[in-house]
Image (spheres, grey):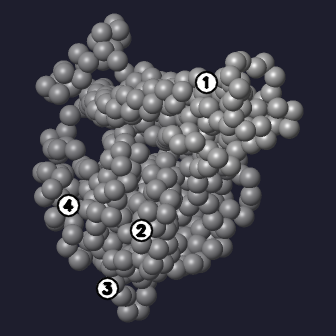
Amino acid sequence: MSYRYFICAILAMLCATGWARTSKEVAKEIQQLNKQVESLKKEQSKLKKQPKVVYAKEPIRAGNITKRLGTVEINRRFECAYAKGVYHENRWTKNGGWRDEVCSKCSGKYYEWRDYQGKIDSSKKAVARLEAIDEELDQLKDKLTELRKEKSELAIEENEAAADAKKSKRDSSKPKSKSDGKAKDYMIVDLESGKVAYEAMVSQAESNQKYQAPEYKTRYLVLRRVPAGTYWIGGPEDASVKIDLGRNSYHSVTTSKDYYFAIYELTIAQYDRLMEAATPSDSTEPKGGISYNIQRGSAQPAATPTSGPIANLNRKTGLEFDCPTTSMFEIASRAGNASKWISGDSPDGLPEYAWLDGSNVPRPVGTKKPNDWGIYDTVGNQWEIGRDAWNSADLALLQPDPLVPMSASEDDDKNALLGNGVVEKYTNNPPRSRFSMRHCSFRNNTRVHIGCRLTVIDPQH
């Protein structure tokens, strides 16, 4: 048992005995705080609509009340416009003495002024409450930032513990082989011969550098291993909020098998080799214009691709490659990250990871930073066809098993679309660039910014 697994096991025991919190518990607390924030903002909006009532700093000669910029100003003591010398606040006459009567010509104005005078105290209370709400919102914002960081750290620890436990159980149940060596982190497919090889990772940084070589974007297909285990996906935490066209509430999923996920979108050079072009290109730009029907031969989500590049790859290798499901795509894209964006809890760093400039022109693959598993361009650069039929209901209910494609469709002519392509600008609508973004496309859509990324269940399972 590894040292890390031992530590994770202790954390799991602490969670079970109540001494440590789980990421799910923190997520519930975040949800409660978000409700408090929403409630305070509604109260704040309501109070801001009320006019502010104050005494005028200078006498108002044109009348007893002046309204400007959401503020009502009233005279402290003003002279009657019709009975010279009568001051309505004290009802004092120029001849001396108090009078209970008010000039009949301006009695209406007097009562209007008196009504506003009665609102001064409530206006002061509203201003004080607005200041208190601002202070409460600042405190809640700081607390939410701390909780999101805690949730991210806990989710990573839990994923590692689950993966280590799964691996330990699997390793203990099968006989050891002298040829096993290290875990096969990468699958390398020769697209010309169909030969499949596996390579162990020395370090993620070294692998990232190695697979940047042009041949791994042209002749070979490189796929990164995604270990079986439990992962948190979706968001934001409020399940009632839609991400683009489909809902995807924060929830956990468990993969029963390892799968391999291509580190690059399928390039023009790779496509040419799969389609056995006479003179294959060496372009590392992603292949565009390949619709769902072209990629899978119009096969239904649960069926095997019948023609096109995926069917050709399966014939060459004897394996069962396909497009990823929505959950498989998000698990691989997150790489164990529990934040909202690949850049963290703020979208400001997205340009380091994604082409999202509204240009409608995909760039060569692997030119931005990869995620923590060495996978590139899962956000931006190109919309990628998903295997799932399209349904905008909550993904948490639609796809309990991440490895099984969704078949319940709202429109038989549409399928899932993943990755948020380069046609979008992250500054215009940051939620569309989140990990949990869901979209759809017609199955015959052949626009240039729609392409493909391949995945396969680990054949060694």
Mark before the other along the chain sequence, 3 or 1: 1
Q: Secondary structure at mark 4?
A: helix
Mark before the other along the chain sequence, 1 or 2: 1
Locate residue 240, reporting x and y percent: 62, 37
Residue drawn at x 58%, y 72% is 291
Q: Which residue is mark 3?
A: 282
Q: Secondary structure at mark 2?
A: loop
Q: Which residue is mark 2?
A: 356
Q: Is residue 284 visible?
A: yes
Locate residue 64, reporting x and y percent: 69, 40
In front of the other: label 4 or label 3?
Answer: 4
Horizontal side, residue 17 vs residue 453: left or right? left
Look at label 2 and name its amino acid: Leu
Residue drawn at x 38%, y 69% is 355
Mark before the other along the chain sequence, 4 or 1: 1
Check contact, mark 2 vs mark 3: CB within 8 A: no
- The local crowd at label 3, few if under 14, some if 14 to 19, many if 20 or more residues have their Cα within 10 Å, is some
Give the spatial CA distance, label 2 vs label 3: 25 Å
Give the spatial CA distance, label 4 vs label 1: 64 Å
Q: Is residue 318 visible?
A: no
Q: Secondary structure at mark 1?
A: helix
In front of the other: label 4 or label 2?
Answer: 2
Look at label 3 and name its amino acid: Asp
Mark before the other along the chain sequence, 2 or 3: 3
Q: Nearer the viewer, residue 295 or 208?
A: 208
Q: Residue furthest top?
A: 17
Give the spatial CA distance, label 3 vs label 1: 74 Å
Horizontal side, residue 34 vs residue 281: left or right? right
- The local crowd at label 1, few if under 14, some if 14 to 19, many if 20 or more residues have their Cα within 10 Å, is few
Q: Which residue is mark 4?
A: 208
Q: Secondary structure at mark 3?
A: loop
Q: Which residue is mark 1?
A: 122
